[in-house]
Amino acid sequence: MKSPLIQSLIEAFRVLPGVGPKSAQRMAYHILERNKKGGTTLSSVLSEAIEKVGHCSQCRTLTEEATCGICVSERRLKTELCIVETPSDVSVIEQSGIFRGKYFVLMGHLSPIDGVGPEALGLDQLALRLASEPIEELILATNPTVEGEATAHYILQMAKQHGIKASRLAQGIPMGGELEYLDSGTLSQAFLARNTLES
């Protein structure tokens, strides 16, 4: 029989996405048997992050500052605003180094079944930005799911009301992908979003 404290530690690890009972047990025993110092560091940093990290006042991403570094940067384009669902989407785009504009993080997507409406996504705050900032293009980078598409469509209507151009990230065949391994939805999207080639 496990000690109550070890069982509590195992259950605590299960809050992480994709971590089942066996993985949680392995993590707990690894820290207790082999890496107590690492566990102490993890505990300390996790506690500090939970206490100090909040949302950026402008883009809503996670930051320990009132306004994140991207929003305060003078080197970022003020005319392009990329709409994403999560702070991790910002990280992925930033790692590519391809986008030089600013962001707005929805912290989710529209889902009436789950009670997630426009207010929960901060779309009132987005409307204020569209009305007051020199934004020329909204880049919709929501996920290609039913909810992500519905969210993109809703924001597209907002952009039209403000006379702002809106674009959607291209979807379809990934670089290095082979046709035989694609699902029909991805292949359909690739055909619909095909480009004309210049000779």
Image: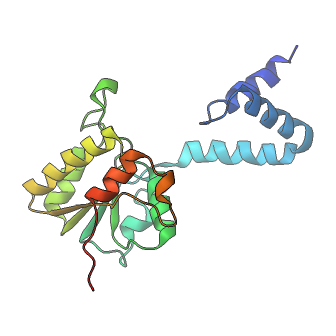
The colour scheme applied to this rendered structure is rainbow
Residue 111 visible in the snapshot: yes
| Location of residue 74 in the rendering, given as x and y in whole percent from the top left corner | 35, 77
State the image coordinates of residue 125 (x, y, percent, origin top left). 24, 49
Q: Please report the residue visible at 49 percent of the width from the left and 54 percent of the height from the top.
A: 180
Quarter that holds the N terminus: top right
- Count of marks overlaid on the render: 0
Q: Residue furthest right?
A: 33
Residue 70 picture quarter: bottom left
Q: Position of residue 25 (x, y in %)?
A: 79, 29
Q: Is residue 195 left or right of residue 177?
A: left
Q: Is residue 17 above or below residue 89?
A: above
Relative horizontal placement of residue 155, taking residue 41 as reference (left or right): left
Residue 168 place in picture, x, y as percent = 27, 59
Q: Quadrant of the C terminus?
A: bottom left
Residue at 8% x, 54% y: name it. Answer: 161
Name the residue at the top extreme: 1
Residue 103 image-quadrant placement: bottom left
Of the pair 40 and 123, the residue shown nearer to us: 123
- Can the viewer see residue 63? no
Q: Is residue 36 left or right of residue 108?
A: right
The one nearer the camera, 168 or 192, is 192
Which one is in front, 121 or 48? 121
Which residue occupies 86% across, 17% down?
2
Residue lying furthest front: 180
Say above or below: 196 vs 52. below
